[in-house]
Amino acid sequence: MTIHEFGKYNSKTIVLVHPSVVMWDYFEYVIPLMENDYHLVVPAIPGYDPDEKNDFTSVEEITDELVKWLIQNNLTEIHCIYGCSMGGSVVIRSLLDKRLKIERAVVDGGITPYQLPWLITRFIAVKDFLLISMGKFGGIKLLEKAFSTDELSEEDIRYAARVLAMISYRTIWNTFESCNNYEMQKKTYTECRKIEYWCADAELRDRKSDIRYMKKYFPQTKFKLVRNAGHGGLAPFQPKRLVRGLTGKAKEREEPNVLG
C-alpha cells in the first residue's frame, strides 16, 4: 500500500480514505486546504493505486495493513479518520482495532456489512459487479445513471474512464463482495466516542440499511444529512464544505428523524 503524507510535521493526524472507482487524488482539492494545519495521511488503496499494479483484497486486510503502517510510523493517536463509501468501510473496521486511539471518526456514505441471507448478498454483489463492469466496458455514463452521484463534467468522465481502464475485474468483484460482507465482531466495541455518519440527500434511500446498522452497533454515532450533494460528492465538488465538516466548522444540521 502506498501512503501519501502532507503536512508531516503538524501535530494532529487526519487519515483520509478514498472510495472505490477513484484514486487517492480524489482528495486533491482537500489536501491544500488542510496540509498547513494537519498531518494528512492518504493511503492509495490497493487495486486503485496507479503506482502499484495489484488488486483490492478485502476490507479486513487493507484496514490491517493501514493500521500496521500507522503503528510503525508512531501514529497511533489519530485526531480524525475520514472515509467515504468503500473508505467508510475501512473506517468502521478500524474502529475495532485497539492499537489505535481514534479521537473522531467520520463515515461518509460508508458501506456496512449486509445483514441479509448469504444468497441475497451474492445476488447484490453480482449486480454491483455487473454495473461497474458495464461502466468499464461501455462507458462512465452508465455509472452516472446507475448511482446517486453528482452530475459529472466531461473532465470527470475522462478521469473515471482512466480509473476504470486501470482497475481489474478482480478488484471490482473483491471491492463489492468485501464491502458488503466484511467481518465484524458480534459485540462491537470502540473507545472512540465521536463517531459521525454523513449521508448525502441524493443517496438517502440507498443508505437506510447502513444507518440502521450504525444505530444498532455504534449507538454513540451522530448522524448528519448533507444537503445538495451526491454520493461521494464532497471531496471533488465541494472540498471547502468537507474541510469545514472535518475541522468542526460545519453548519450541517443533525437530523436523526430524517436519517432514521
Image (cartoon, helix red, strand yellow):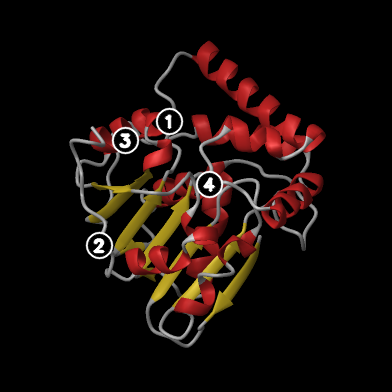
Above-or-below relation of 249 to 177? below
**Residue 23 appears in the rendering:** yes
Looking at the picture, which amino acid does disc 3 mark?
Ile
Mark toward the start of the polypeptide (2 vs 1)? 1
Disc 1 designates what residue? Answer: 206
Q: Which amino acid, mark 4?
A: Asp
User: Tags 1 and 4 in contact by the CB under 8 Å rule?
Assistant: no
Q: Residue at x 58, y 50 (%)?
A: 62
Asked which secondary structure carries label 2, the reply is loop
Would residue 191 be visible to someone looking at this image?
no
Q: How much space separates mark 4 and mark 2, taking CA atoms?
A: 21 Å
115 w.r.t. 26: above or below? above
User: Label 1 to label 4, Cα distance in Å?
Assistant: 15 Å
Q: Earlier in the sequence, mark 3 or mark 2?
A: 3
| Location of mark 4 (residue) | 150
What x and y, as percent, mark residue 170? Answer: 74, 35
Q: Earlier in the sequence, mark 3 or mark 4?
A: 4
Dot 1 crowding, Cα within 10 Å, few <14, some 14–19, many 20+: some
Q: Locate residue 252, reporting x and y percent.
A: 26, 56
Residue 230: give x, y in percent of width and height: 47, 45
Q: Which residue is mark 2?
A: 251
* Amino acid type for the residue under numbered disc 1: Asp
**Quarter of the image where one finds residue 207:** top left
SS state under label 3: helix
Local packing at callout 3 (Cα closer than 10 Å; few below 14, some 14-19, many 20+) is many
Distance Cα–Cα, label 1 vs label 3? 10 Å
Q: CA distance from mark 3 to mark 4?
A: 21 Å
Q: Earlier in the sequence, mark 4 or mark 2?
A: 4
Q: Which residue is mark 3?
A: 211
